[in-house]
Image (cartoon, rainbow, N blue to C red):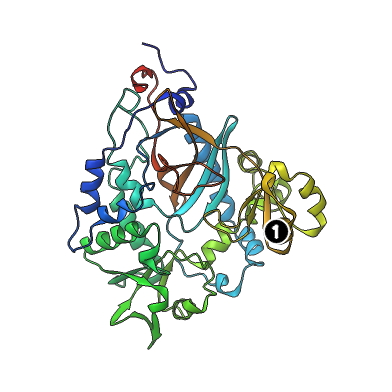
Amino acid sequence: MHEIPRDRAETLNRTCQCATLDRAALALGLDATNSDTTSLNAIVETRPHMFSSTAVFVTPAQLTDMRRIIEAAEDVIALPAYRRHVLRQAPAIAQIDPGARGVFQGYDFHLSPVGARLIEINTNAGGGLLNALLGSAQLDCCAAMRGSSARSTNEPDLEGVYLDMFRDEWNRARGETPLTTVAIVDDGPAEQYLYPEFVLFERMFRRHGLRALIADAAALEYRGGALWHGEARIDLVYNRLTDFYLDDPAHVALRAAYMNGHVVLTPHPRAHALYADKRNLTLLRDPVFLRSLGVGAETAATLAAGIPRTVAVDAAHAPELWDRRRELFFKPAHGYGARAAYRGDKLTRRVWREILAGNYIAQQTVAPSERRIGPSGSPVTLKLDVRNYVYDGQVQLLAARLYQGQTTNFRTPGGGFAPVICPPEGNSVDDCAA
């Protein structure tokens, strides 16, 4: 038997053919807490590429890299001078400080040969509860799985952690006032790909004594100094909308209730402006700017190394960026889910004109690492990224997303969410190739 080498995670990602997902356990977890007629198993079956059957392996050094970058970014974002600078370019709704921090910040990484690289930060990172369930439905199918030191999370009770997070949001905004009713809100929630997670959250809140409902944002009403869904007065909204500043006319009730301080909204517009506006990446990795804020040299160096070179797209830099486009990735400042994002080597002149007319950043391309699955005679290579779910500066959970194509898409056979495993030193890789 061979010992796992220093690059054991890469070796396992390339050679391990284990199917780690216990589908029976996953099915039980999806419907174990069902107190109504909704079968999540039936819903998930219509989304066959939501969960991968395999795991992704990382090294302790990669885990340390990601945490250092997250800690450095959180330290900078907490600075009053940084916040004042960033909020100057944000709309009025983002100037409101509601007290709440914002749940489920997502720090997304590519794992390059020279270390983890932060690709973007999101304030509406979906999948936290789905991945908690996925992580609890894994088989120790080989030696590399047994005794793993980081099986997606070190928290034994993630549901409790999440519930405490929502209560903390409420208490930051409302003090000791009792929390009664929570609404999970999106546009046409039942049509959303991650709708099964909405149902899981609804059940979680109800199990812990809260009134909970899933609501279409357009069905909300603002009346009598409160936000309502039918006859239910809503205290807290778990916001799954991608209209980050609530500009859509369909969101007028939610916007009015939030701006008048009559509902706790999480995540909220201020969190998006501070964390997820992709223009912020140009500042977080700029040592000159960080030095002007008084940021220490070590923190600045961590961010400069950990964030790919990122610049705003404007007319002054257009010729240079077009010439260098093949090594760049273009993203809208307020984009999400890779929508309207473009690989530079695929750009046409027409799309380039749209990018110049829009509000985009250009980021140095960092190739994602890979996970090879399937039998040795006909393996399939999938790309991967690693998401850290973060609240109040603390990493709650890690999850990988496996895919083919330009960006994550949940359309790839064998792809989807996957747990993140850090195999112990000295474990064999031989029995992972069976």
Q: Which residue is drawn at 40% across and 14% down?
A: 3
User: In the rendering, at what x and y percent does residue 429 appear?
Assistant: 38, 19
The percent position of residue 173, horizontal first and vertical second, equals: 41, 69
Res. 272 image quadrant? bottom right
Where in the figure is residue 96, as x and y percent of width and height?
A: 53, 72
Amino acid under disc 1 = Ile
Q: In this view, does 116 lie to the left or right of 290?
A: left
Give coordinates of residue 257: x percent, y percent: 44, 79
Query: Split into 4 quadrants, where in the image is the C terminus?
Result: top left
Please tell me how many numbered marks the rendered image carries. Answer: 1
Eyeballing the image, is 104 above or below 185? above
- Residue at 34% over, 52% down: 129
Q: What residue lies at 51% left-to-right and 79% top-to-bottom?
A: 249
Q: Quarter-wise, where is residue 226 in the image? A: bottom left
Quadrant location of residue 177?
A: bottom left
Q: Residue furthest top?
A: 1
Q: Assign a secondary structure to mark 1.
A: helix
* Residue 327 vertical position relative to residue 256 in the rendered view, above or below: above
Q: Which residue lies furthest to the front in this view?
A: 378
**Residue furthest left in the image:** 35
Residue 179, above or below 325: below
Disc 1 residue crowd, few under 14, some 14–19, many 20+, Cα 10 Å? many
Label 1, on which residue? 355
Instruction: Describe residue 319's horizontal placement relative to residue 150 as left or right.
Output: right
Judge whether residue 401 can be spotted in this image.
yes
